[in-house]
Image (tube, helix red, strand yellow):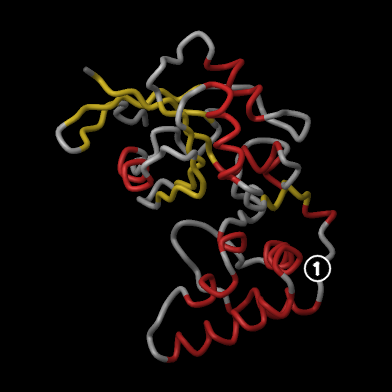
Amino acid sequence: MRKNSVIEIKGKLYTRIPVKTKILTPEDDMLEIVKKYTKSIIKKDDIITISESPLAITQGRAIPVEKIKVGFLAKFLWRFVSNVKYGIGLRSPTSMQCAIDEVGRFRILFAAFVGGLGKLFGRKGDFYRIAGKQSALIDAATTSPVPPYENCVIKGPKKPEKEAQRIKDFLGNETAVMDINDIGGCWMIGGSTGIDKKFMELVMKDNPQGQGDELTPVCLIRELK
């Protein structure tokens, strides 16, 4: 279902313009993608948003499951990850192994220990607080419906702040890297120096880019005057 492109934030109206691209690969550069696909529509004061998984793909961080060597620790720990309504996350051996590869087994073990204790006292989220942002950003295989990435674990993008600033420095538009789902989860994980994190999380909260096979990794936010 097509979402409303216009949203009101603090009495002002903004339109969100999803930008369709080709399927991205590790051979692509996100700056070049943004330049190519927005050049005919972008305006001076537009804000650029980039979805985190497509950015990660351009960084070579989509790992085919057949290339992931799952160790004993991942086979043991994934079973203790809670089911959540917004995705599989680390509740699979391959995505858990990617988290171990990303942040180290000792940090994952400590996070699992603290997370387990937290659950005994009714606390949630301790595992990811200890394991860190990169663990939380991992998307399990089957999360992406876009071939050839439906059978890949996609790690979070590296240095999203630096990537956002690189795009702003070249194009002049404020830029944010967003992690959004279709059930109200919306987080800015990196932005250029002039970006307002709270505003970005409000203006993109209903996920106007979609989460299926829309091929809209870039979105422009424009105030209607």
In this rendering, the answer to whether 115 lies above or below 3 is: below
Q: Nearer the viewer, residue 45 or 157?
A: 45
Q: Looking at the picture, how far across and down is residue 225, in whole percent?
A: 21, 17
Decide: few, some or many residues near mark 1? Use Cα within 10 Å; few <14, some 14-19, many ≥20.
some
Tell me which residue sits at (66%, 43%) in the image.
56
Tell me which residue sits at (54%, 76%) in the image.
127
- Count every numbered label the image shows and give the total: 1
Q: Nearer the viewer, residue 8 or 206?
A: 8
State the image quarter where residue 81 is shown: bottom right
Q: Nearer the viewer, residue 225 or 165?
A: 165
Tell me which residue sits at (19%, 29%) in the image.
12
In this rendering, the answer to whether 209 lies above or below 114 is: above
Pointer 1: what residue?
70
Q: Residue furthest top?
A: 40
Q: Using residue 48 as the reference point, say whether residue 36 is left or right of it.
A: right
Label 1: which secondary element: loop
Classify the position of the N terminus by image quarter: top left
Tell me which residue sits at (42%, 37%) in the image.
194
In this rendering, the answer to whether 6 lies above or below 105 is: above
Dot 1 amino acid type = Val
Q: Looking at the picture, how far across and down is residue 199, in whole percent?
A: 31, 42
Q: Using residue 45 as the reference point, say whether residue 143 is left or right of it.
A: right
Q: Nearer the viewer, residue 85 or 187?
A: 187
Q: Looking at the picture, how far across and down is residue 22, in whole percent?
A: 64, 22
Q: Looking at the picture, how far across and down is residue 146, in whole percent?
A: 63, 36
